[in-house]
Amino acid sequence: MDYNSSPSNIFGGFMVAFLLFGLFLVLMNIIGMWKIFVKAGKPGWASLIPIYNSIVLIEIVGKPTIWILWLLIPCTAPIFGIWLMNLLSKSFGKDEGFTVGLVLLSFIFVPILGFGGAKYLGPSAAEAQRFNGMNDPFGNSNPFNPPPTTPQA
Protein backbone atom coordinates (compact mmCIF):
# COMPACT_ATOMS: atom_id res chain seq x y z
CA MET A 1 0.00 0.00 0.00
CA ASP A 2 1.26 3.47 -0.89
CA TYR A 3 1.31 5.71 2.15
CA ASN A 4 3.18 8.57 0.46
CA SER A 5 0.18 10.17 -1.30
CA SER A 6 -2.35 11.98 0.77
CA PRO A 7 -5.98 12.78 -0.05
CA SER A 8 -5.07 16.46 -0.25
CA ASN A 9 -2.75 15.78 -3.22
CA ILE A 10 -5.54 13.98 -5.06
CA PHE A 11 -7.98 16.76 -4.22
CA GLY A 12 -5.43 19.33 -5.43
CA GLY A 13 -5.10 17.51 -8.74
CA PHE A 14 -8.87 17.50 -9.20
CA MET A 15 -9.03 21.21 -8.37
CA VAL A 16 -6.34 22.05 -10.93
CA ALA A 17 -8.14 20.01 -13.60
CA PHE A 18 -11.46 21.65 -12.69
CA LEU A 19 -9.97 25.14 -12.84
CA LEU A 20 -8.28 24.45 -16.19
CA PHE A 21 -11.57 23.15 -17.61
CA GLY A 22 -13.39 26.23 -16.28
CA LEU A 23 -10.77 28.50 -17.81
CA PHE A 24 -11.21 26.71 -21.14
CA LEU A 25 -14.99 27.28 -21.02
CA VAL A 26 -14.56 30.98 -20.19
CA LEU A 27 -12.07 31.41 -23.03
CA MET A 28 -14.47 29.74 -25.48
CA ASN A 29 -17.20 32.17 -24.40
CA ILE A 30 -14.91 35.19 -24.78
CA ILE A 31 -13.67 34.12 -28.22
CA GLY A 32 -17.22 33.30 -29.35
CA MET A 33 -18.52 36.70 -28.21
CA TRP A 34 -15.60 38.38 -30.00
CA LYS A 35 -16.64 36.67 -33.24
CA ILE A 36 -20.32 37.56 -32.69
CA PHE A 37 -19.41 41.22 -32.25
CA VAL A 38 -17.27 41.18 -35.40
CA LYS A 39 -20.09 39.52 -37.40
CA ALA A 40 -22.45 42.28 -36.24
CA GLY A 41 -20.04 44.99 -37.36
CA LYS A 42 -18.92 46.01 -33.89
CA PRO A 43 -15.33 45.95 -32.63
CA GLY A 44 -14.35 42.57 -31.22
CA TRP A 45 -12.38 44.05 -28.31
CA ALA A 46 -15.68 45.43 -26.97
CA SER A 47 -16.53 41.93 -25.75
CA LEU A 48 -13.69 42.14 -23.21
CA ILE A 49 -14.89 45.22 -21.29
CA PRO A 50 -17.48 44.20 -18.67
CA ILE A 51 -20.32 46.73 -18.87
CA TYR A 52 -19.47 48.10 -22.31
CA ASN A 53 -19.96 44.64 -23.83
CA SER A 54 -23.54 44.64 -22.59
CA ILE A 55 -24.12 48.08 -24.09
CA VAL A 56 -22.76 46.92 -27.46
CA LEU A 57 -24.87 43.75 -27.25
CA ILE A 58 -27.94 45.91 -26.63
CA GLU A 59 -27.04 47.94 -29.73
CA ILE A 60 -26.62 44.74 -31.76
CA VAL A 61 -30.14 43.56 -30.96
CA GLY A 62 -31.63 47.03 -31.41
CA LYS A 63 -32.94 47.82 -27.96
CA PRO A 64 -32.59 51.24 -26.32
CA THR A 65 -29.46 51.83 -24.26
CA ILE A 66 -31.54 52.25 -21.08
CA TRP A 67 -31.64 48.44 -21.01
CA ILE A 68 -28.22 48.52 -19.36
CA LEU A 69 -30.01 49.78 -16.25
CA TRP A 70 -32.33 46.76 -16.29
CA LEU A 71 -29.35 44.44 -16.73
CA LEU A 72 -27.58 45.94 -13.70
CA ILE A 73 -30.52 45.65 -11.29
CA PRO A 74 -30.30 42.20 -9.65
CA CYS A 75 -34.05 41.48 -9.67
CA THR A 76 -34.57 42.27 -13.34
CA ALA A 77 -31.22 41.10 -14.73
CA PRO A 78 -32.19 37.43 -15.29
CA ILE A 79 -35.38 38.36 -17.15
CA PHE A 80 -33.78 40.97 -19.36
CA GLY A 81 -30.69 38.81 -19.85
CA ILE A 82 -32.77 35.94 -21.21
CA TRP A 83 -34.73 38.39 -23.34
CA LEU A 84 -31.45 39.81 -24.66
CA MET A 85 -30.21 36.32 -25.56
CA ASN A 86 -33.51 35.66 -27.38
CA LEU A 87 -33.13 38.86 -29.38
CA LEU A 88 -29.51 37.97 -30.13
CA SER A 89 -30.49 34.59 -31.53
CA LYS A 90 -33.26 36.22 -33.58
CA SER A 91 -30.76 38.78 -34.92
CA PHE A 92 -28.76 35.88 -36.34
CA GLY A 93 -31.80 34.04 -37.72
CA LYS A 94 -32.06 31.40 -34.99
CA ASP A 95 -35.19 30.26 -33.15
CA GLU A 96 -36.21 29.90 -29.50
CA GLY A 97 -34.51 26.52 -29.17
CA PHE A 98 -31.19 28.21 -29.84
CA THR A 99 -32.09 30.79 -27.17
CA VAL A 100 -32.50 27.99 -24.65
CA GLY A 101 -29.06 26.75 -25.64
CA LEU A 102 -27.58 30.24 -25.28
CA VAL A 103 -29.02 30.56 -21.79
CA LEU A 104 -28.30 27.08 -20.43
CA LEU A 105 -25.20 26.00 -22.38
CA SER A 106 -23.63 29.29 -23.41
CA PHE A 107 -20.13 27.82 -23.52
CA ILE A 108 -21.30 25.65 -26.44
CA PHE A 109 -23.83 27.86 -28.22
CA VAL A 110 -21.91 31.17 -28.14
CA PRO A 111 -18.99 29.68 -30.13
CA ILE A 112 -21.49 28.00 -32.48
CA LEU A 113 -23.07 31.39 -33.14
CA GLY A 114 -19.69 33.09 -33.50
CA PHE A 115 -17.88 30.51 -35.63
CA GLY A 116 -20.88 28.96 -37.41
CA GLY A 117 -22.48 29.96 -40.65
CA ALA A 118 -25.12 32.22 -39.08
CA LYS A 119 -25.21 35.66 -40.66
CA TYR A 120 -26.12 38.83 -38.82
CA LEU A 121 -29.52 39.85 -40.19
CA GLY A 122 -29.76 43.15 -38.35
CA PRO A 123 -31.38 44.12 -35.09
CA SER A 124 -34.32 41.91 -34.22
CA ALA A 125 -36.01 44.23 -31.73
CA ALA A 126 -39.34 45.64 -32.86
CA GLU A 127 -38.17 49.16 -32.02
CA ALA A 128 -35.32 48.88 -34.51
CA GLN A 129 -37.53 47.45 -37.26
CA ARG A 130 -40.49 49.75 -36.81
CA PHE A 131 -39.43 52.44 -39.26
CA ASN A 132 -37.46 50.52 -41.86
CA GLY A 133 -40.41 48.93 -43.62
CA MET A 134 -39.83 45.38 -42.42
CA ASN A 135 -42.94 45.23 -40.24
CA ASP A 136 -45.20 47.30 -42.49
CA PRO A 137 -47.96 45.00 -43.74
CA PHE A 138 -49.06 47.54 -46.37
CA GLY A 139 -45.66 47.97 -48.02
CA ASN A 140 -45.44 51.70 -47.33
CA SER A 141 -42.06 53.12 -46.43
CA ASN A 142 -43.72 56.01 -44.58
CA PRO A 143 -44.65 54.92 -41.05
CA PHE A 144 -47.30 57.63 -40.79
CA ASN A 145 -50.55 57.92 -42.68
CA PRO A 146 -50.10 59.87 -45.87
CA PRO A 147 -51.71 63.30 -45.88
CA PRO A 148 -55.11 63.42 -47.54
CA THR A 149 -55.13 64.48 -51.14
CA THR A 150 -57.52 67.10 -52.33
CA PRO A 151 -59.72 66.07 -55.23
CA GLN A 152 -59.08 67.79 -58.54
CA ALA A 153 -61.99 69.78 -59.93
Image (cartoon, helix red, strand yellow):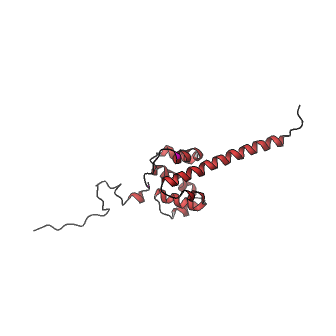
Q: Position of residue 62 (x, y in %)?
A: 46, 58
Secondary structure mostly seen in the magenta stretch: loop
Picture residue at 53% right of the left edge, 48% below the top: 114
Q: Is residue 76 visible?
A: no
Number of labels in the image equals: 0
Picture residue at 53% right of the left edge, 51% below the top: 35
Quadrant of the rendering where the C terminus is positioned: bottom left
Quadrant of the rendering where the N terminus is positioned: top right
Q: Position of residue 107 (x, y in %)?
A: 59, 46
Q: Quadrant of residue 73?
A: bottom right
Asked if the magenta segment contains residue 123, the reply would be yes
Which region is colored magenta? 115-125
Q: Is residue 119 left or right of residue 32?
A: left
Q: Is residue 13 visible?
A: yes
Q: Is residue 148 left or right of residue 80?
A: left
Instruction: Name the one closer to the observer, 98 or 12.
Output: 12
Q: Position of residue 67 (x, y in %)?
A: 52, 62
The relative height of residue 97 versus residue 152 in the rendered view (above or below) is above
Asked if the magenta segment contains residue 91, the reply would be no
